[in-house]
Image: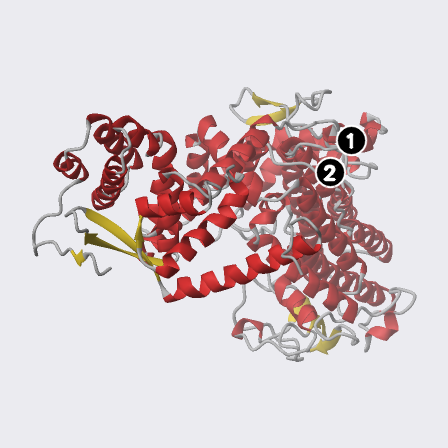
């Protein structure tokens, strides 16, 4: 280094560019052109290009000085297409580490984006090329159960005839004033608490007159209620009929034989269940009216018809039908208890025995929740939403997303969203849904687990440790179902089975208490007095004294207060309040959930809620009834 | 005879580091030295040399400095760093062990006993 002096450019002087350096070097044309081409092809920063140009210029000058021809010197620099990328790559490695870090980060982001695009393309193709494999005709399978019965074994035709006759007659009754022209509150109208209407209610005579108009159809329906099956037709096809009075109803049409042409099972319309509820109300009014006119045979017949209707709907083996059956059973028990209270000498032992038998059978049938139809409904949903790989698995399809959106559209906002969802948008977002929402097997597995738990919960006594364990499992599973996107599709079609089981357990308690009340009245008919203790009813009038569900292991409470028998459960506060109702409570006291919560907690901790401070009195019925 | 690309990729940097261990040198000088002192075996063109020099510089094994030569022209001199010296030492040990192993196998002719 002794022969060379360090060269320092003047401060603040702008460094020459690559082109300026090449021009200033006064190189032979071929060399200058080659260096310019190489430097340009590197596409490096301006300062880097200038530095490389400077070095190649020095190199070329040394070669020419050493005796090489300009052409040879140019050639020895190499072809721009070869050397430029090598120079570019190696020069970039010399850059500052911050640039390197930024460069690598951007590279990683770019690669990730490319990978995501690649994955999306694969998913897009898979999603848009998959199609459901609809093989089973689940609607036809549902109808098979009733197909073995002839029309004269089905109650539904007579119920439909009564419903169609009752619609125009009932319609004028539904419009009434609650206040007079001066704004004063009018006495209670008979329709305000129909079918528990009272002869003292305003408009009662009109209701009786309307009732008389449909008496032939009512008699036929009462007779038909004793038939073996209800006979609903499961179909998604119907015709909306408007009769000469302008009243409309649904005429169910047979479902398509080809499952491709029919809608999903969930779309099956069941107007007959609504009709059954209305007809039961008419039976209830008929029974109360007969009791008022001291006609025990007719009252017993109508009461029996209510319980038979609960039995018929309960036998339809769909969860919704079972819930309707429980509601009809509860209504029948309520009107029965009211009649027993208001007309304690109306029925003889034979009447009471016949009513007790029918109510017992219908109570059991209504509570016998059957999840088979829910399973079929879910199987039908899967076959319409997913592909089928033949091994129980498959992926979500565009048809599945469309179906899920349709089924999920339960609010006006959702309906708007569905309407605005274009086919293109669905095609684009569907692949993400396919990835996030899990496979056919995922949905099937969690649904099967839930349904097995539902069966087990129904089969175990509600106050048992096993029931509590199963209930905790069910709570965990339903939480998972509600929170995990993986089970989003299953969540759409999973019934609120826990609530149904809670209602069934509450229904059982109420039926047990109602049957005990009938036994009390039967005992009084035979002996002329109320029993001192319930054990006097066992076994000739009652197989056993029922258990208090709020006081596991102990019987329903019974007290004679001023000569009136009181039958009650202790309620959610777990305290015997000596047959006192809570100061304030809702229509559906006690809430089935409070019963279920008590079972699930298993700690027998009494409820401290004000609305739970009192007893659940079955008899005598609540005065407001 | 020139070396195959893979062999050159291994031997080239060691050869350059070795030349720079004696004194700082500039690009053309390195090309000439590699050709003359290896009888052309390790001769390399600019398209190989300069990217190699930039890579060694990026790794911190050599450092560069522009200097004005006696004839007034600019030249970029490359010098070995401390890290480069250590690397050269390691490379030399490995090359010696490799040569010893190849000699033991009879692939290379050993020095007479």
Q: Quadrant of the N terminus of chain A?
A: bottom left
> SS for tag 1?
helix
The crowd level at tag 1 (other Cα within 10 Å; few <14, some 14-19, many 20+) is some
Mark 2 sits on what residue? A376
Q: How is the image coloured?
A: secondary structure
Residue B81 appears at what percent x and percent y? 35, 63
Which residue is painted at 87% across and 68% down in the image? A544
User: Which is more toward the observer, A155 or A608?
Assistant: A608
Left/right placement of residue A520 relative to residue B20 reads right
Residue A69 appears at what percent x and percent y? 27, 28
Q: Chain of mark 1?
A: A
User: Which is more toward the observer, A616 or A56?
Assistant: A56
Residue A364 appears at what percent x and percent y? 80, 53
Mark 1 sits on what residue? A141
Distance from label 2 to label 1 (Cα)? 9 Å
Are dots 2 and 1 in contact, CB under 8 Å?
yes
Quarter of the rendering containing residue A53: top left
């Amino acid at each position: 280094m002794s022969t060379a002096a360090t060269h320092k450019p003047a401060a603040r002087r702008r460094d020459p560019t690559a082109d300026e350096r090449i021009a200033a070097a006064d190189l032979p044309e071929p060399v200058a052109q080659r260096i310019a081409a190489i430097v340009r092809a590197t596409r490096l920063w301006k300062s880097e290009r200038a530095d490389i140009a400077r070095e190649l210029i020095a190199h070329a000058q040394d070669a020419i000085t050493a005796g090489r021809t300009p052409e040879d010197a140019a050639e020895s620099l190499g072809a721009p297409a070869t050397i430029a990328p090598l120079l570019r790559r190696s020069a970039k490695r010399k850059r500052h580490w911050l640039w390197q870090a930024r460069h690598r980060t951007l590279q990683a982001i770019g690669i990730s984006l490319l990978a995501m695009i690649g994955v999306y393309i694969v998913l897009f193709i898979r999603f848009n090329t998959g199609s459901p494999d609809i093989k089973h005709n689940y609607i036809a399978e549902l109808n098979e159960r009733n197909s073995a019965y002839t029309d004269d074994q089905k109650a539904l035709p007579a119920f439909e005839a009564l419903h169609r006759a009752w619609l125009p007659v009932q319609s004028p009754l539904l419009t009434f004033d609650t206040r007079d022209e001066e704004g004063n509150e009018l006495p209670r109208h008979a329709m305000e608490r129909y079918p528990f209407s009272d002869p003292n209610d305003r408009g009662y005579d009109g209701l009786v007159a309307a009732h008389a108009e449909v008496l032939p159809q009512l008699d036929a329906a009462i007779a038909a209620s004793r038939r073996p099956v209800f006979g609903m037709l499961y179909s998604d096809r119907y015709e909306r009929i408007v009769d000469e009075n302008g009243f409309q109803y649904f005429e169910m049409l047979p479902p398509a034989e080809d499952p491709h042409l029919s809608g999903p099972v969930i779309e099956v319309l069941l107007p007959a269940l609504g009709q059954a509820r209305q007809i039961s109300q008419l039976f209830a009014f008929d029974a109360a009216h007969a009791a008022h006119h001291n006609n025990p045979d007719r009252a017993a017949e109508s009461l029996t018809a209510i319980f038979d209707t609960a039995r018929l709907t309960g036998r339809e083996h769909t969860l919704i039908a079972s819930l309707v059956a429980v509601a009809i059973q509860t209504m029948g028990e309520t009107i029965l208890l009211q009649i027993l209270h208001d007309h304690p000498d109306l029925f003889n032992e034979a009447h009471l025995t016949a009513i007790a038998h029918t109510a017992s059978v219908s109570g059991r049938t209504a509570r016998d929740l059957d999840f088979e139809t829910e399973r079929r409904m879910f199987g039908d949903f899967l076959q319409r939403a997913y592909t089928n790989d033949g091994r129980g698995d498959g992926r979500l399809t565009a048809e599945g997303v469309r179906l899920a959106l349709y089924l999920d559209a339960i609010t006006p906002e959702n309906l708007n969203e569905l309407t605005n969802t274009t086919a293109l948008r669905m095609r684009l977002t569907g692949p993400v849904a396919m990835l996030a929402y899990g496979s056919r097997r995922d949905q099937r597995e969690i649904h099967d687990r839930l349904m097995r738990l539902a069966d087990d919960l129904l089969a175990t006594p509600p106050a048992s440790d096993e029931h509590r364990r199963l209930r905790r499992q069910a709570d965990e599973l339903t939480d998972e179902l509600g929170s995990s996107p993986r089970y989003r599709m299953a969540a759409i079609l999973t019934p609120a089975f826990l609530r149904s089981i809670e209602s069934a357990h509450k229904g059982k308690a109420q039926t047990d208490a109602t049957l005990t009340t009938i036994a009390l009245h039967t005992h009084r008919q035979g002996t002329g007095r109320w029993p001192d203790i319930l054990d006097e009813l066992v076994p000739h009038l009652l197989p056993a004294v029922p258990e208090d569900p709020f006081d596991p292991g102990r019987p329903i409470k019974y007290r004679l207060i001023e000569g009136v028998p009181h039958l009650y459960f202790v309620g959610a506060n777990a305290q015997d309040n000596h047959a006192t109702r809570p100061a304030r409570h809702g229509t559906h006291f006690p809430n089935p959930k409070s019963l279920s919560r008590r079972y699930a907690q298993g700690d027998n901790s009494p409820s401290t809620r004000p609305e739970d401070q009192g007893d659940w009195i079955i008899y005598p019925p609540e005065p407001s009834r | 005879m020139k070396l195959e690309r893979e062999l050159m990729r291994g031997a080239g940097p060691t050869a350059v580091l070795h030349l720079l261990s004696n004194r700082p040198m500039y690009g053309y000088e390195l090309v000439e030295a590699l050709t003359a002192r290896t009888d052309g075996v390790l001769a390399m063109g600019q398209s190989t040399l300069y990217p190699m020099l930039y890579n060694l510089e990026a790794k911190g094994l050599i450092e560069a400095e522009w200097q004005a030569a006696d004839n007034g022209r600019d030249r970029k001199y490359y010098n070995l760093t401390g890290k480069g010296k250590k690397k050269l030492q390691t490379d030399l040990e490995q090359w010696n062990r490799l040569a010893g192993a190849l000699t033991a196998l009879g692939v290379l002719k050993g020095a007479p006993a």
